[in-house]
Amino acid sequence: MNFLTLLLPVLLIAAVFIGLVMLRRRLFEGEKSQAPIPIPDLDVARAAAPKVVSATPPAAAPGRAVAAPERPSLTPARLYPRRALSDIEMSVFSRLLKALPGYVVLPKMTYDHFLEAKDGSPSENTSLQNRAAGHLADFLVCDKKLYVLLVCQIEDGTQVPARIQERERMLQKAGLRLLRWNVAQPPDPAKVLNMVQTLAKVKAGTRGTSAGVSSVSGSGGTRKTANRD
């Protein structure tokens, strides 16, 4: 009796231990049989998410104004005719026509119309010709055969100094005279006519003159000619 009394607790403890081991084993096998739960990729999820456009414009940086968005036009853009010369150009054009009877005055001619690049390699000639095409003469004074005698440039304070210097170099190398027409002090017509007549005589005799830049002021003013080697 005493022996059975001592054996019974041992058997109970063993049965509980075996039951726990079997339960743990079943739980472990069940976890292995279940498929792993996928973890979402946050980068992919963000890329697939629809873009939300805010109707509120971005805040302007301190000291800067944000340009208003351009409204779509209800009609397509189109071209309209307009006068070829501005008011200032028309005034100078009229003065040249009155001062130079017997000569041809051509407005708004790019330099590549009366200058031609030669003597260099094909690529050098093309490059120089393209640079000439980027400059615009306000007026050309020509003889009746359309040989250029004088290049007239209106001076109104809007010219870029570097481009003025490049124009002067081009005309200097081509042997053409540049007349800077100051809109504040238009030159005296008689002085302009005298200059063109002198250039025409030289051109007729040599078909080329030394280049220079002339600045002709109004009546009572001075006339300066600066030849450049």
Image: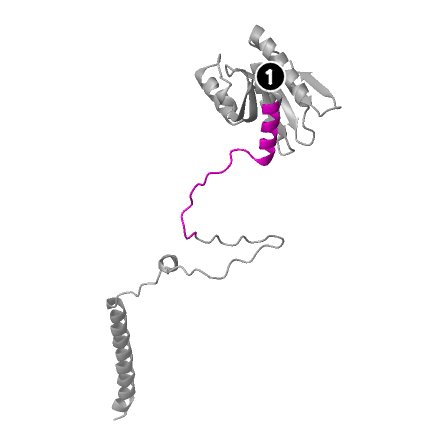
Quarter holding the C terminus is: top right
Q: Is residue 162 visible?
A: no
Residue at x-position 68% and y-position 25%: 187
Q: Which colour scheme is used?
A: one colour
Residue that protrudes farthest toward the right in the picture: 220
Q: Relative to 50, say whether 115 is above or below.
A: above
Q: Which of 203 and 127 is in front in this view?
A: 203
Which residue is depicted at the point 51% across and 36% down? Answer: 83
What's the residue at 27%, 73% (across, down)? 27
Residue 21 visible within the image: yes
Q: For the magenta stretch, what is the residue range? A: 73-98
Q: Quadrant of residue 217?
A: top right
Q: How many labels does the image show?
A: 1
Q: Residue furthest top?
A: 205
Q: Position of residue 224 (x, y in %)?
A: 71, 19
Q: Image quadrant for the N terminus? A: bottom left
Asked if 121 appears above or below 20 in the picture, the reply is above
From the viewer's side, name the closer residue of 129 and 63. 129
> Residue 215's spot in the image, x, y percent?
68, 22
Residue 184 position by quadrant = top right
Q: Which amino acid does label 1 sit on?
A: Gln
The local crowd at label 1, few if under 14, some if 14 to 19, many if 20 or more residues have their Cα within 10 Å, is many
**Does residue 36 appear to the left or right of 57 in the view shown?**
left
Specify whether residue 151 is painted magenta: no
Which residue is more in the foreground, 71 or 30? 71
The answer to whether residue 22 is left or right of residue 218 is: left
Locate residue 93 relative to residue 124 in the image: left or right: right
Label 1 sits on a secondary structure element that is: helix
**Image position, residue 186 (x, y; %):** 67, 28
Is 93 contained in the magenta span? yes
The answer to which of 67 and 29 lies nearer the viewer is: 67
**Disc 1 target residue:** 172
